[in-house]
Image (cartoon, rainbow, N blue to C red):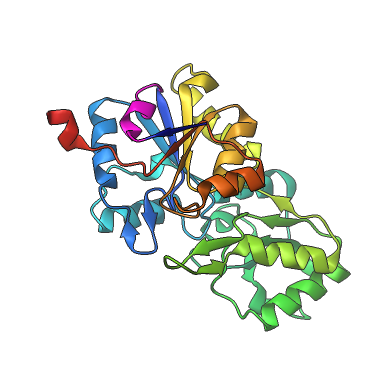
Amino acid sequence: MKKIDNFKSIIDKYQVVFFDAYGVIKNFSGLVPGIEKTFEYLEKEKKEYYIVTNDASRSPEQLAASYHRVGLHSITPERIVSSGMLSKDFLDLKVPDGIVAYLGTPDSAHYIERSGLEVLPMSQVNESNIDKVSVVIFLDDEGFDWCNDLNKTVNLLRKKPIPVIVANTDRAYPVNANDVSVAIGGIAAMIESVVGKQFIRFGKPDSQMFMYAYDLVREYRPISKNQIVMVGDTLNTDILGGNKFGLDTVLVLTGNTQAKDYETRIISAGIVPTYICDSAVVDLDELEL
């Protein structure tokens, strides 16, 4: 584990960079200041990069558009690998028919609508259709009634032996410099403990997330894991997942892990990144000197 001041010196060692989204590229106040310079540098050096995110709240097209609206045009839908993509693959392979009941916003249902199954928000599950529900999927922490719909989910899962997918494993996310909000992964963990069943999880730190991104790169050219680096702000998703998959990892201190306590959190978690850096920003002004 090395504390490095210059992010450029890290990514220069690799051919492909995987970035987490929230806490690395953007945070509660918008884009991380100066992050656009990093993508200018990657484009200039013709380095490949992908956004590997647990955000299943919107489609890759919608996620890319959200970056474009704030001036970061380098991130295209083809460069986004979302945990929602793995959820769709599971439905295509394992759930041939029936209703997919979901917790989330209509935008988050994009992935499961593509699978060709009947899709219903949990609020619309009732006595007339409950027998047709063949899978429940946790997509986003918004778009449903936290009391009525969560209680309905608990009772549905107590009665029916059906698979449950958690498309976003994040348990919390920062909403300002001091506070966090409960994410859908945290909601899923609570319900899992109540119903006493084990849910299927997609997203970091699961290795399937990294394999999906790795296979995506290998479609275009040969690449080995030691030529890829994972950049993230969260020890138990980004860094743990990258480490388990055999990638070098960079912990940046612009999101869930802060400069004031990163050493304590690393020791407590036992999850050790290859590098630590204040941010994922490349200073182009220094390059011109």
Which residue ends up furthest to the bottom in the rendered image?
Answer: 148
Q: Quadrant of residue 221?
A: top left
Magenta stretch: includes residue 7:
yes
* Drawn side of residue 45 relative to residue 217, left or right: left
The answer to whether residue 53 is above or below residue 163 is above
Q: Magenta segment range?
A: 5-14
Q: Position of residue 6 (x, y in %)?
A: 32, 33
174 vs 58, nearest the viewer: 174
Q: Is residue 246 left or right of residue 218?
A: right
Tell me residue 162's x, y (percent).
81, 59
**Residue at (36% x, 51% y) in the render:** 64
The residue lying at 65 percent from left, 47 percent from top is 268
State which quadrant residue 16 falls in. top left
Vertical side of 49 occupied by 25: above or below:
below
Horizontal and vertical percent for residue 138? 64, 62
Q: Quadrant of residue 267?
A: top right
* In the depicted structure, whether residue 48 falls above or below residue 120: above
Comparing 81 with 93, the one in front is 81
- Image quadrant for the C terminus? top left
Q: Percent from the top left, x then y, of residue 72?
A: 26, 49
